[in-house]
Every structure is written in C-alpha cells, then in structure tokens.
DNA sequence: TTGACATATACCGATATAGACATATATATT
DNA sequence: AATATATATGTCTATATCGGTATATGTCAA
C-alpha cells in the first residue's frame, strides 16, 4: 500500500509546500491562475494541478471571470487541522507537564553512563 | 519526482492518520510501544516505523526503561503547523472578509446563466 | 473564422511510501 | 547460558505522487 491520496483530506493536501505557498498567496485575496504562476515561479500545469487538489479537499473555491478562473481560499477547511493541533497546544505552552518527565529529560542530557544517585 | 519524504517535516509526518492516532494516545502521557500496539490494533513493526518517522521530525521523544521504550509527545514540533494554520484562522472566523467576495458567492448560488446587471 | 490568451488535462518516469512478514538487537529471567 | 519479552530493522510489492511536456478546452479579439 502506498501513501494516502493527497486529496484524502486537508492534512494530506497541505503537506505539500507548494500548495501551502498557493494558499498563502490566495490569503491576500482572490487571484487568477496566472498570478499564482508568476508569484510562485511554477509551471502553469503544476499550479493547475495543485489547485485541483486544493479544490477537491475544499481548501479553495473558484469563480469564472471571462477566460480567467479566480481562486480564493476557503479557510474553513483548515479548521480540522487547527482543532486537532489545538489539542496539543498545552503540550508546548505548559512550562512543565509532569515533574518526573522533566527529571527524565535532565537525566538524559547528562549522558548515558552517568546515573549517579 | 515523488512526494516529499514523510520525515521532511511535521506537516508530512502528521498527514498519516495512524501517526496522528499515535500522537493522540501519547497525549495522555508517556507509553511503551506495546501499549500503542494494543491501543491502536496495529502490527508492532508498523508502530515502530511510525514512531521512527515521528521521532525524526521531533514529534516524539523516547526514554529507555529496561527493555521497554517509553515514548512521549513533544508538542512543540507541532507549533509550525499551528502557527501556519493560525494565519488563516480569521478566514473562517470573520463573518465577512470582503463584501464583493460575499456578493460573488451569492451570485454563484443563483446559478450560471444569471448575470443580470 | 482564425488566432491569441488562459487554464485544464493526459501521459510519462522516478521515487517514497505503508503494510506484511521475517529477523535482528537488547534486556530481563531462570 | 538459554529462553522469553520488547522493540527495531530489512525486504518485498503495489500505488499515488510530482514535475515536465504536449495537448485539449474555453473565451476573447479582429
């Protein structure tokens, strides 16, 4: 079995850095494909294909304007990621979670041979 | 060229649902590999391999306890994801971002043929 | 209608994956 | 030392990907 399809969910779609870059550009507002092509210095077919993936998971939406296709972000599709990561937020916010974990870390930093006391 | 390695960054590592499941179990505290195997009903080698990926991107840390290896979450490695997604948070929090975008949405819901005015 | 512009799709090749299974390594127990 | 337990690693296979290039579709202009 191979990796899950990139169109499986937002997690997979967003794992690709160029797709994140596309979303970042679109964050400033609606843009036609060509703007993305020049902004990101990518080939047009690649951009279109990335946009297809983003569209299939609902991360972007399109609108036709003459011969151009205007893409815009649909951030709500990022909410599952946001929510999931949020449950771990305390892990790095908290100064200490459990004392013995901290002690273990200290012990490990001492090296392997030293376990005096 | 294929997809980026799963060990490239947290984004790629976390795209795999079973790895997220592992992190969720570890969120409740430090656990040996066997606990994960039974908790997730996965084969032991698969769990070890997923843990390796998670470790390579810094999402988990290990500690040896006799013949067991105790794994724990290092949530700080999720911060890049959190920060990135956060910049889009307003997109789905805001009631309206820009008026014309809302108007476009309404126009699209009307159907394709109608473009009166 | 013909041509230019904008975008989408099709095909190709190389590659990293994830599960399955076998096996190696490390530690504890007797 | 021999065995059992706990975990890691190696090999195999099928598959979805990503970039590149060519081409199809769709729209505007003359």
Image: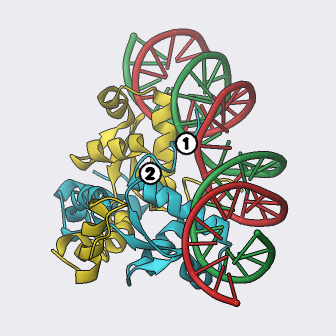
Chain colours: A yellow, B cyan, C red, D green
As helix, strand or loop, the secondary structure at mark 1 comes to loop
Q: Is residue C24 above or below residue B35?
A: above
| Residue A73 numbered mark, or none | none
User: Which residue carries the number 1 mark?
Assistant: B3
The answer to whether residue B82 is visible is yes
* Image label count: 2
Quadrant of the frame with the N terminus of chain B: top right
Q: Residue at x 38, y 62 (%)?
A: B59
The answer to whether residue A98 is visible is no
Using the rendered view, name the quadrant where residue B92 is placed: bottom left
Question: Are the residues under marks 1 and 2 on the same chain?
Answer: no
Query: Marks 2 and 1: in contact by CB < 8 Å?
Result: yes
Drawn side of residue B58 relative to residue D7, left or right: left
| Residue A15 numbered mark, or none | 2
Q: Mark 1 falls within which chain?
A: B
Drawn side of residue A104 relative to residue A44, left or right: left
Using the rendered view, name the quadrant where residue A36 is placed: top left
Q: Residue at x 33, y 47 (%)?
A: A23
What's the distance in space between the residues labelled 1 and 2, CA to CA? 9 Å
Q: Mark 2 falls within which chain?
A: A
- At which x and y percent is residue A16? 44, 46
- At which x and y percent is residue C7? 46, 35
Q: Of C29 and A31, which appears nearest the observer? A: C29
**Residue neighbourhood size for the residue with mark 2, other residues' Cα within 10 Å, grouped as few (<14), some (14–19), many (≥20):** many
Q: Is residue D17 above or below residue B24?
A: above
- At which x and y percent is residue B25? 46, 80
């Amino acid at each position: 079995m191979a990796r899950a399809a990139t169109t499986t969910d937002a997690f997979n779609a967003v794992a690709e850095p160029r797709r994140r870059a596309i979303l970042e550009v679109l964050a400033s507002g609606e843009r036609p494909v060509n703007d993305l092509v020049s902004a990101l210095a990518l080939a047009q077919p690649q951009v279109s294909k990335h946009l297809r993936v983003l569209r299939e998971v609902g991360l972007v939406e399109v609108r036709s304007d003459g011969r151009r296709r205007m893409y815009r972000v649909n951030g709500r599709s990022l909410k599952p990621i946001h929510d999931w990561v949020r449950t771990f937020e305390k892990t790095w916010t908290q100064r200490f979670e459990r004392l013995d974990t901290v002690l273990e870390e200290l012990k490990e930093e001492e090296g392997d041979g030293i376990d005096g006391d």
